[in-house]
Every structure is written in structure tokens, then in C-alpha cells.
Image (cartoon, helix red, strand yellow):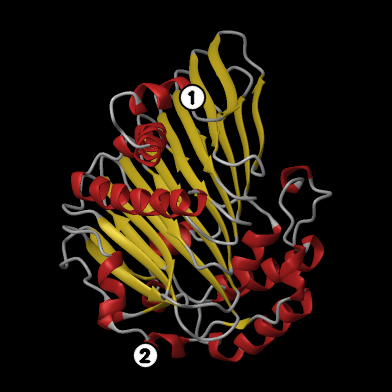
Amino acid sequence: MSDVFQAAFAAAKARRAAEPQWLREMREAAMARFGELGLPTTKHEDWKYTNVAALSKLELSPAGADGVATVARDAVTPLRVEGCDALVFVDGRYAAGLSAAPAESDGVTACSLAAAIADGDAALEAHFGNVAPESGFTTLNTALAEDGAFVHVAAGKRLERPLQLIFLTGPNGARAAHVRNVIVCERGAELTIVETHAALEGRTAPYLSNVVDEIVVGENATVDHVKLSHEGAAAHHVATIQAHQARDSNFRSRSFALGGLLTRNDINTRMDAENIHATLDGLFVVDGDEHVDHHTIVDHAKPHCGSHELYKGVLGGKSRGVFNGKIFVRQDAQKIDAIQNNKNLLLSDSATVNTKPQLEIFADDVRCTHGATVGQLDEDALFYLRARGISREVAHTMLVYAFAGEIIDGVRHEAVREHVEGRVRQRLAAVGAKRS
């Protein structure tokens, strides 16, 4: 598989001759580093329960710009969130004709990564490749990413409407798309991002979506990030979301993984100053042979910070879920208040969960808790509802949604919350239909 990516990198060199030198040098270094790291195996502790070896058996060609012309606006409409501006990407390439970009505004930039590179944007140069952690997939992304979103909100500015980033995999054959999103929210600025990943209806060919988000949250800034993925049945979706927070900032991440053969989300934040808060919540719903893995790291590097983390999973069929969350408190990072929980609901005797919440604490004046549960629906609650004339199927759906609803309710923007709720209900109904 490494040879395939090396060939893709070599083929891209000619068309990248116009890129700035700093980026070309960064890509060369990243490709060399990928040659050393390779893709992770189950021998890596962080990948113990998630095997990506199947990727090496797939003949994945690099996703090209040809997919943009194959997608009609009608295919994008169901993915749109009402009241949001939208940048749309097909096979990892910006599709201007399908987008509804925000109106030009002083101090706010929202465009494709390719456009920002061509414009020589200074904020992009300052942050591209300097936030995401080093791994096989992130170095590969740095080397091969052709496009993605670049969002920059200047100090004291506010993006009035949520910005939706839609990444749609088109109808073409087995493809690999590498997407890089760079989101910079300067001092005192506010921003809501809705990131959607989906496949064109009816797509059956396998594909890889390798996504890296680098999010910079400036002093006293607030970033709300909602990720919604309902990928195709043959999708391999591997994503890293890395936030870097400055003093008095607030980062709120809510992730909803609702489909895909294999989904891996690494969601991390580093608190590099005092009085920072982060919320990392998530919900995954899997069925059949689907596999989903969430790894999170909250790195408390300075005192007087707080974090709240709640991940929930609903599993049917022979699906498998993995959760590995780490709260890391560095030496002298006193007065930390951190909570982490993982709760899982098994709808099938054949579904499995591996959960590993972790605390690594090197300070002594902290309040940190963590926990994990795995269980099934409460039969007493089912009996209570059925005794009131509610069918078993409806009662089952009500209880499962009640379990999931806590994460949905945390989405702050009403239209975004309603859109997410609709997608979750649709997914839960599909899982329930297979069960009945």
C-alpha cells in the first residue's frame, strides 16, 4: 500500500511546482516520514482493536477533480443544514457550483485550501502542519492533501451563520481522498463549524477518506465543532481533529458517527494556558459488520482548566465499537476539573465494545473522574411502556433514542441540532428494522 501512496506523491509533484517552497518542503518531509512510519498495525497500542490491513488489499487510485462534474445539486440538498452557509467538496475537491459560500466580510475568510495556498495566506502558512500530531495517517495527509477548507476569523470577529463543510464521495471507483481543513479563530472571535461526511447514494465501491482538521482557538475565542459522518457501506473513514487552545478559550466538539465499514476518529485538544474549557462529546450508531473507533486526548498543560467528555455508543448486529479516552494532566497543572465517561448500549448479543478510559495525572490538586459502562436495554423500562399499550418495537425505539438524546441535546444551534436529530432517528430506525 505504501508503494501506491508513494506513486501518487510522485505523480502530484509536477502540478505542485507552483506551490510555495515551505509547503513543498513540508510535503517532502512528510512523505519521507510516512515511509518510516507506514500505516499503523494492531501491534500499535492505540490501534490494538482496529485493523486497517484491509486497505493494503484495495486498489485505491488517487481521487481526482473529475468527480465534481458527476454530482448534481439535488444530491447535496439533503445534506445541507438550514440556515448554514456551505462549502462543498466532492472526492476531496472544492465544488464551487454546489457551494453556498459565506458573503465576503472584513476579517473573515472561508475558502478552499487550494485557493488559500494559491493566495499565499499568512495564517495558513503559520498553522498548516503545525497543529496535528504526527502519525502514519496525518503525515500521509500532509503529503497528499490536495484540498479542504480554510477558515480564518480575525480577532473580535464572529461568523454570523454556522459554516457547513460537506465532503461527499462521488460515484467513481475505488478512490483515496486526503482532506486537510485548517480552522483559525483569533482572539475573542466566535465560530460554529458543521462538518458532514457522506457518500453518493448507491455507491458500493470501497474508498478511503483520510481527513485532518487543525483547529486553532485563540485567546478568549469560542469554536463549536459538530461532525456528522454517515459514510457509504464500503467506506474507510480515518480522521484526526486536533485543537490547540489559548487562554480563556472554549472548544466544544460533538461527533456523530452513523455509518461506514470502518470509522476511526482521533479527537484531541491541548490546553496550553490557564482558564480553558473543552467539551468532547460523541455518539456512534453501528450495525452489521461495521467498526467504529474513537480515541480522544485532553491534554491539560496549564492550571485552572476544565474538560467534560461523554461518548455513547449504540451497537447492533455483529458490529464493534472502541473507545479509548485519555485525560492527561501535566506536572504543575493544578486546579484541573475533568470528567470523562463512556456509555454503551448493546442491541445484539453479537455486538462487542472495547472501552478504555484513562487518567494520567502528574499534579496533586485536581478533580478528575472517569468511567465506562456496557449494557442492554432495561427490561423493566420496556415492561413499563408496554403495560401502557405501547408496542415493543415503539418502546424499544423510545428507550434507545432516550439514551442517545443527551448527546444530541448538547448541540447548541437549533437548526443544526434538528438536522442531527433527524439523521440519528433515521439511523436508529434502520438499526431497529434489522433487529425486528
- In the image, residue 296 sits, relative to residue 103, either above or below, namely above
Q: Secondary structure at mark 1?
A: helix
Residue 302 visible? The answer is: no
Residue 146 visible in the shown view: yes
Q: How far is the residue under mark 2 from the one under mark 1?
A: 51 Å
Q: Is residue 332 left or right of residue 241?
A: right
* Left or right of residue 114, residue 414 in this image: left
Percent of width and height locating residue 58: 71, 77
The image shows residue 376 at horizontal and vertical percentages of: 55, 30
**What amino acid is found at the position of numbered circle 2 in the picture?**
Ala
Q: Residue at x 33, y 72 (%)?
A: 88
Q: Residue furthest top?
A: 365
Q: Residue at x 41, y 75 (%)?
A: 201
Which residue is disc 1 drawn over? 379
Task: Give the amino acid at mark 1.
Answer: Glu
Task: Give the residue number, with chain letter if any, for mark 2.
Answer: 69
Percent of width and height locating residue 330: 62, 24
Q: Secondary structure at mark 2?
A: helix
Q: Is residue 117 above or below residue 219?
A: below
Front position in the image: 272 or 329: 329
Compared with 275, 122 (above or below) is below
Q: Residue at x 59, y 17 (%)?
A: 332
Select label 2 or label 1 by which is in front. Answer: 1
On the image, the x and y values in percent for residue 278 come to: 42, 32
Judging depth in this view, the residue of 331 and 340 nearest the camera is 340
Disc with the residue nearer the chain's start (2 vs 1): 2
Occupied quadrant, residue 37: bottom right
| Circle 2 residues within 10 Å: few <14, some 14–19, many ≥20 | few
